[in-house]
Image (cartoon, helix red, strand yellow):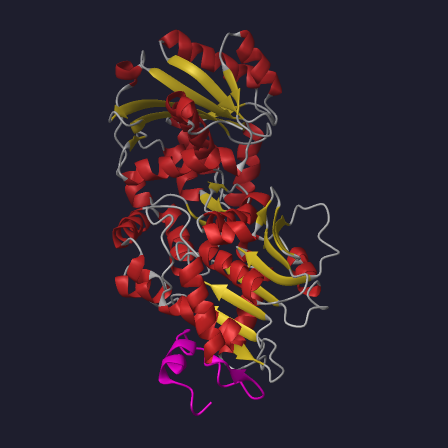
Amino acid sequence: MASLPKKWYEITRALPGYDPFEQSEGYIFDPEEADRRIRFVEAACTHVKGKLAGEPIKLELWQKALHANLFGWKKPSGERRYRESFVYVPRGNAKTTNAATIVLSCMCLDNEPGAECYSAAAEREQARLCFECVEGMIRNRPELTEMYDIFKYSIVLGDNSYKAISADAKSKHGFNAHLVVNDELHAHKDGELTETLMTSTLKRSQPLVVHLTTADFDRVSICNQKYDYACKVRDNLIHDPAFLPVIYEAEPDDDWESEETWEKANPNWAVMDHEYFRRECQRAISDPAFRNTFKRLHLNLKTSSNVSAFDMVHWDDCDERNPANLVLESPCYAALDVSSKQDLTAFVIVVPEYEDDSDEITIESLDVFSWFWVPQEAVSRRSREKSLFATYSGWSETGDLFIQPGQRIDQDDIRQFINAKRDEGWNIQSIAYDPWNAEAIRQGLEADEFQMVEFTQTIKNFSEPFKDLVSLATEHKVRHGNHPVLRWNAANCVAYEDPNGNIRPDKKNSIDKIDGIVGMIMAHALAMQERVDESGGFLLA
């Protein structure tokens, strides 16, 4: 190793915090093989999408370090040193492209008889991304197109094959994997797919499993287990010379608003859109529901899956509202969040103002009107549990909360109230409802000739209108009239975020009741759907 050119010392040590020489006893570095792998990628592999589609890939230093270490280090017998790698980079750092280059490199250059190569992901659509990238690279090079046979679900080179698989595959057993590229590990629901694929490499002489992922939430998961292990190998707390840790992340005490931090966490920073980061960061500063998303996806900081949905300073600045008499005849959209008959029920109307910029029609602002009901028994019960009797009673005295006698919500009373609103002149286009516990009132309102729209409580349905509503509130474009019950709901509301950045209101983990916010989101969804469904936008599902 003493005669290794300085160039290769610099390249192999370019990965943050990791020195491959510290656990290299019994292994050798072959600079010619490392150079061959890098030259192959830059000569044979191309970009597949975007403005660089069809152009040769030019590897950044960290990508050269990845390929050089993975393929340059060998046992004295000539077999590969590394059997597993954990590549931990934020979104936008070409994970799928990197995965595709590794697949092609192994298929073309490994000389492994009957090599079975796989890209794996939690969902079929994600698994197909790498497959389609590999296919695109092959089709962009006539010399590769002549070598490979491309089928719908597999790519074949001689007796070597490549397939994309997912956790929902009927059978994930029986593989004899030479290469596994395990994509977006943070999205895996459990470790079953990963462990199955790891054990499928046992019969191979130099198998390789590469996990590529963005940060997971702060929870127990296969992604966080691999991350913790990779950190310990990197820091020489675990001796595993066959494991390559590639970890790019911000530290918890770093200034997440700083471009220096963004560059530290993103190894492709030199070729990334810096203006995009500035805009997303500004959004995260002003939008608390997006803040964790920005930190996790763009800085690789593990965050909680729950975050306060609304910044109450911004919410309180939205206290004005157009008087009802000025919006009565305007098209409006409503939602009904019916309680379990024992607590808060909300009816919310939103009156949108639309902006047409010729490219698309968007909601510029909203007037929000809300009404709430609660049974007397719930008032008494909650006064014992949470000392809210005075608050509920106070809201009732001001007309902001209707307390009904008895133990249950009277849905017929609410039905009559909604009909009265129409009689007053409210131009209600449709009413969204959660099908749970609302069948009777749905039938009644449909009999009254209201258009009822079932809104199933899925994250897919909630995410876009919820995000848009939070954004409008942050920009002081939601005029809610400072309704005290609605404000209480907003202060209580916690957003749950899934690994793909979708959000929904989280009733379970919110501080207290959020029925008015749920209703507001559902009504806003109808207003959005009215304008964008024909162009492929939000649709209830």
Q: Which residue is drawn at 63% across and 68% down?
A: 207
Q: Is residue 491 left or right of residue 507?
A: left
Q: Residue at x 44, y 29 (%)?
A: 538
Highlighted range, magenta: 1-30
Q: Which of 94 and 189 is in front in this view?
A: 94
Q: Residue at x 57, y 19 (%)?
A: 410
| The stretch drawn in magenta includes residue 24 | yes
Q: In this view, does 437 lie above or below 447?
A: below
Report which quarter residue 397 is drawn in.
top left
Q: Report how many numbered discs are placed on residues in the image.
A: 0
* Residue 529 seen in the figure: no
Q: Where is residue 426 in the image (x, y as percent from the top left)?
A: 37, 13
- The majority secondary structure of the magenta stretch comes to loop
Q: Which of 47 and 190 is in front in this view?
A: 47
Q: Which residue lies furthest to the right in this view?
A: 174
Q: Position of residue 401 (x, y in %)?
A: 44, 27
* Residue 512 seen in the figure: yes
Report which quarter residue 354 is drawn in.
top left
Q: Which residue is drawn at 31% across and 64% down?
A: 263
